[in-house]
Image (spheres, coloured by chain):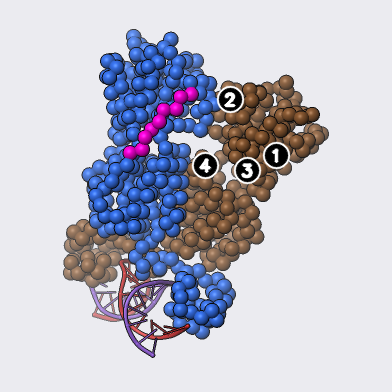
Chain colours: A brown, B blue, C purple, D red
DNA sequence: CTGAAAGCGCTAACAT
DNA sequence: ATGTTAGCGCTTTCAG
């Protein structure tokens, strides 16, 4: 900027005015400055600008895995809202590791992002964020609630959705329904399990421990759990899958077992309508969740100082066939 | 930092030493400083640090749409390599709009990212990046080559992959094969079309204009093109789809038409093996591409100053059934 | 309308 | 082992 000023024969502040489109510069001098800028290939250093101005016009997004379609849709929505507010987006994947979540969030804070959108990793304790929140970094939790910290949160109707899905299977005549879920220390997994249990209890149906399996969503673990639920003295006739990865693993295993059982999955999938039968799912709205979270964030940055808000988005049952087969 | 120094009764530089783990501080004073840091909830301001040090330990990634599984896998790979090098990642979606690509790239540059990974938007002219490259921002293009600029580039074997896929259909006995692709101003789309034409020419087969349709990947456009290719005096008996979105739209339309034609798609899909028949595809390796691009980038940042390099990753045919049905 | 000076929070280079 | 000074590139403040 100094170089530009020298070349244009003006003061530093005049260059600053031109660069930022501030008024108070004759079009004549402005032109001279512009010429110097293009000649020198000058680009304002936003790091320095930020240092002075305080706001960085950037937001940090920490999620489990950007390669997961659920999170990548969510991410895109956060990005869109951020763009409308002139903010850039840092993204980072925690891989469900609380330590990595913390490292990412604190690294973003050290860069002085204006705000943070966080999908908590399983078991993460968010007291580490208290100093940052106090320092004014707007923070919104999404998909799962924070632990040890009170902040804006966006969740899906996990329990209600699972209850509805399970109820749907019950209404088809099923009485032995299995639930295959993610690790129980993940909030969404626990909530969906709760919804399943509620639906079973409401219908007066017992839950055989053999039908419920919570754990990592690796194909092997899910496949083994599935096989276990379908064998033994009280084999399940229907299956509720706790998230998209479980559903994919289960469908694949069922295919290889050549067994056809009723199945409903939590989370919609790209090709769900093209399987035979079509996959009945309880669909969340990842883009809607991302949008809602970003809106809460920018409301804070816009001056809202009320108590933390909690938004819950509905999950809706999409009937396609796999959940409508009666018990064998 | 000044406050911490005052509270600990030490100089500014001593605090800096402690914060950065530099040697030359007695464990006694270091402890006092640490106490002051936690008491005040101090966190180093990396923006200021960056301003002083020059390097920002951040990378900008511009792609078409982070919600697309191909790009989200790629993104995750870039993130992983960046993390190994201690860098954070800015991401932004251009939505195939050259202007937005430029805005994003220049915004990242203004933040003084150390490097840039760019999926060029259709028709973008990259001369706008020349000043930034000259200023030392390492730049790698991925998925599509740059225009008007010579820089490191990572591509898939688009033409070879399409040729192999088309050849596979020909070997199944098909002679009338349609090609449904993305807009022809997108490099990958044009290359894949070229591969298709080469395979047809090699086999001495004519290409009816009615079989080739390039354009937006909206379900309606693809569906209409598909219908057109399958009707008329010389209906196609097989179909090559130019990318994942085209494939999804085509499979869906075929289903609703209740027509079964041989089909091969470029890009693998999550559920490809679960459709009936399984979907034969020419698969790229998005994670491998992201990794390669990030490695080229950090090689530059590590001091490599040789001429721009070009990496081409193979695309491989995965046989699952849909591409192995003979002509009706 | 224009510019000089101070300072954002930190680190490099040099004292002590 | 510790502290002091200058300055990264910009904006803010205030004076011409």
Q: Chain of mark 3?
A: A
In this view, the residue in front, C8 or B84, is B84
Q: Which residue is mark 4?
A: A68
In three-dimensional space, the C-alpha distance between marks 2 and 3, rounded to whole angstroms, equals 25 Å
Same chain for marks 1 and 3? yes
Label located before the other in sequence (2 or 4): 4
Seen from the viewer's position, the closer of residues A136 and A225 is: A225
Dot 2 alpha-carbon crowd within 10 angstroms: few under 14, some 14 to 19, many 20 or more: some
Label 3 neighbourhood size at 10 Å, few (<14), some (14-19), many (20+)? some
Residue at point 55%, 45% (across, down): A289
Residue A216 badge: 3
- Write down the region rendered in magenta: B312-320
> How much space separates mark 4 and mark 3, taking CA atoms?
15 Å
| Residue indicated by mark 2 | A278
Residue B295 on image: x %, y % = 37, 49
Given contact means CB atoms under 8 Å apart, are the residues at marks 1 and 2 in contact?
no
Which label lies toward us, 1 or 4? 1
Q: Residue B313, percent across and down?
A: 36, 38
Marks 4 & 3 on one chain? yes
Residues under labels 1 and 3: Cα distance? 10 Å
Task: Specify the quadrant that holds the C terminus of chain A.
Answer: top right
Q: In which quadrant of the rendered view does residue A207 lie? A: top right
Q: Are marks 1 and 4 in contact (CB under 8 Å)?
A: no
Q: Relative to B30, does residue A229 appear above or below in the rendering? A: above
> Which sits in the foreground, C9 or A138?
C9
């Amino acid at each position: 900027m100094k170089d530009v000023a020298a070349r244009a024969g003006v003061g530093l502040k005049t260059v600053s005015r031109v660069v930022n489109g501030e008024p108070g510069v004759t079009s004549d001098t402005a032109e001279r400055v512009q010429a110097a800028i293009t000649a020198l290939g000058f680009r304002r250093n936003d790091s320095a600008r930020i240092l002075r101005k305080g706001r960085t016009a950037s937001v940090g997004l920490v999620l489990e895995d950007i390669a997961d379609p659920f999170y990548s849709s969510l991410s895109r929505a956060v990005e869109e809202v951020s763009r409308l507010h002139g903010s850039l987006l840092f993204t980072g994947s925690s891989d469900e590791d609380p330590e990595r979540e913390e490292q990412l969030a604190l690294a973003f804070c050290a860069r002085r992002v204006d705000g943070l959108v966080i999908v908590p990793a399983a078991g993460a304790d968010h007291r580490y964020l208290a100093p940052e929140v106090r320092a004014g970094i707007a923070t919104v939790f999404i998909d799962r609630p924070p632990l040890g910290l009170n902040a804006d949160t966006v969740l899906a109707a996990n329990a209600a959705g699972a209850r509805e899905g399970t109820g749907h299977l019950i209404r088809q005549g099923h009485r032995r329904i299995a639930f295959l879920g993610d690790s129980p220390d993940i909030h969404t997994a626990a909530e969906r399990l709760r919804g399943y249990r509620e639906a079973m209890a409401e219908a007066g149906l017992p839950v055989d421990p053999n039908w419920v399996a919570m754990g990592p969503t690796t194909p092997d673990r899910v496949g083994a759990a599935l096989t276990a639920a379908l064998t033994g003295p009280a084999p399940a006739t229907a299956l509720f899958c706790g998230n998209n990865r479980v559903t994919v693993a289960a469908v694949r295993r069922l295919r290889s077992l050549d067994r056809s059982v009723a199945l409903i999955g939590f989370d919609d999938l790209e090709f769900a309508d093209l399987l035979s039968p079509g996959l009945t799912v309880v669909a969340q709205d990842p883009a809607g969740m991302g949008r809602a979270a970003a809106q809460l964030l920018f409301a804070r940055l816009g001056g809202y100082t009320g108590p933390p808000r909690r938004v819950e988005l509905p999950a809706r049952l999409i009937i396609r066939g796999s959940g409508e087969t009666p018990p064998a």
